[in-house]
Image (spheres, rainbow, N blue to C red):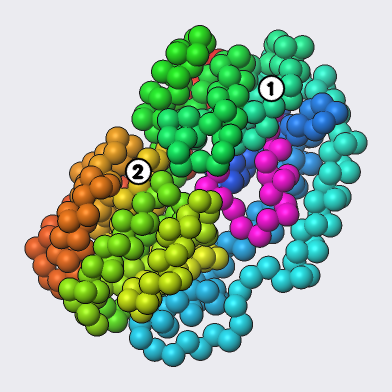
Amino acid sequence: MTIRPIAFDLTRLVTRLRHASPSGIDRVDLAYARHVLAGAGPRFGLVSTGLGPRVLDRAHASRIVEAVAAGWIEDVAAESDPVYRRLEARLAGRPADVAAGRGPTRSSTLRRRRIQAETVLGIFRAAPVAALPEGSLYLHTSHLRLDKPERFDWLYTRADVRPVFFVHDLIPITHPEYGRTGEAERHRLRMRTIGRHAAAIIVNSADTGERTLAHLAADGFGRPPLAVGHLGVEPAFGREGPRFAPDRPTFLVCGTIEPRKNHLLLLHLWRDLVERHGPDTPRLVLVGRRGWEAENVVDLLERCESIRPHVVEVSGLSTHGLAALTRSCTALLMPSFTEGYGIPIVEAAASGVPVVASDIAVHREIGAGFADFLDPLDGLGWRRAVEDLSRPGGEHREALARRLDGYVAPSWPAHFKPADALLAAL
């Protein structure tokens, strides 16, 4: 049987050569790049440029992918991650023994820039899109450049190429109030590009899939074949591995600090808990970078004296550091107003940590059977959950923990099965 050639779009990964750490979409892009380029049959990388797409052979594309992964400060053991070690000391109530912060050094930044410059030169010397074999599949998993439809006009010329796109979410369209100005229209442009060209679509959840097909139909496009694959949990997350004992109940929140994540609810809740419990207030750990239009949250973090001893903000954790922190916490809180998926929920469940999440469709899809669901506006309900879970040996805490017995988290191999089947069916 002839195996169809596949060209994977490397454009986003090339741009990430200048970054020291990945976003969620970057992780998906990396997983797909490795999976595709390691597969049987003819495999290529494709990079969109202002002069048209350039086609890279498998070896060249793989070198770029691994250079990007090597530049990210990710895959270090928790014990070797100074950010984690300082956080562990603080949460365990002992002096920190790590002097220097971990972060990109000047030499590592210069190295990434050099690799990026060399990569860009190599890309411009690569072959034009005419070099792609007849009947190739083209796989784009990052949303990048989709708001520039002219970058995909080559698909009209190469009508033999079957394009497949990964849709991560429709949040800028369905909830424009949570995005940057103009982002809703940019996302509509992305979806129109997909509508014009897609032979098939891959999504991270059934909820995202339903929203995607409904939006395309409403915009006058067809309903292309679709595969749903829940995103895989990295092997670092699990019940076994480094952990520590916090000096009091400690709750974890993961994600960029931005309005749709609903950090504001939790910070107001924590101010109320301080008034009710004083020095016995549980601790809240916010893991994630500060995002856009989060001024109200930042004001509370920086100016509310009462919560300062009880709320910890951290970013720059390695994957293994985050996994060790997750295992050590009392519960994960995820009060988001909207999500495309919600990877912290399944990471926490894989780690044996109870989950309380907002009652939205995608959270029920991935957390049914083990998570507690609350309306994202139900402040009193969230307070009751935190207080109940803070009681050692409490019935609620033990009941949530029991729900995780036998839980099997989504894996990347499981994710790729429906995606590969979709590609094979084209």
- Of 85 and 295, which appears nearest the observer? 295
**Magenta span has 18?**
yes
Q: Amino acid at mark 1?
A: Pro
Task: Determine which residue is flagged by label 1.
Answer: 149
Could you tell me which quadrant the C terminus lies in?
A: top right
Label 2 or label 1, whichever comes before in sequence order: 1
Q: Is residue 245 left or right of residue 163?
A: left
Residue 299 seen in the current view: yes
Crowding near the residue tagged with mark 1, few <14, some 14–19, many ≥20 C-alpha atoms within 10 Å: some
Residue 198 percent across, percent down from the top left: 58, 18
Residue 404 seen in the current view: no
Residue 150 percent across, percent down from the top left: 74, 21
Q: CA distance from mark 2 to mark 1?
A: 30 Å
The quarter of the picture where residue 353 lies is: bottom left
Crowding near the residue tagged with mark 2, few <14, some 14–19, many ≥20 C-alpha atoms within 10 Å: some
Q: Is residue 268 left or right of residue 237?
A: left
Task: Determine which residue is flagged by label 2.
Answer: 337
Q: Is residue 190 above or below residue 21?
A: above
Of labels 2 and 1, the one closer to you:
2
Magenta region, residue range: 1-25
Q: Is residue 347 above or below residue 8?
A: below
- Of 125 and 261, which appears nearest the observer? 261
Q: Residue at x 88, y 36 (%)?
A: 124
Q: Residue at x 80, y 23 (%)?
A: 129
Residue 279 percent across, percent down from the top left: 24, 82
Q: Residue at x 53, y 31 (%)?
A: 184
Q: Amino acid at mark 2?
A: Phe
Q: Check disc 1 and report its element: helix, strand or loop.
A: helix
Could you tell me which quadrant the N terminus lies in?
A: top right
Q: Residue furthest left?
A: 395
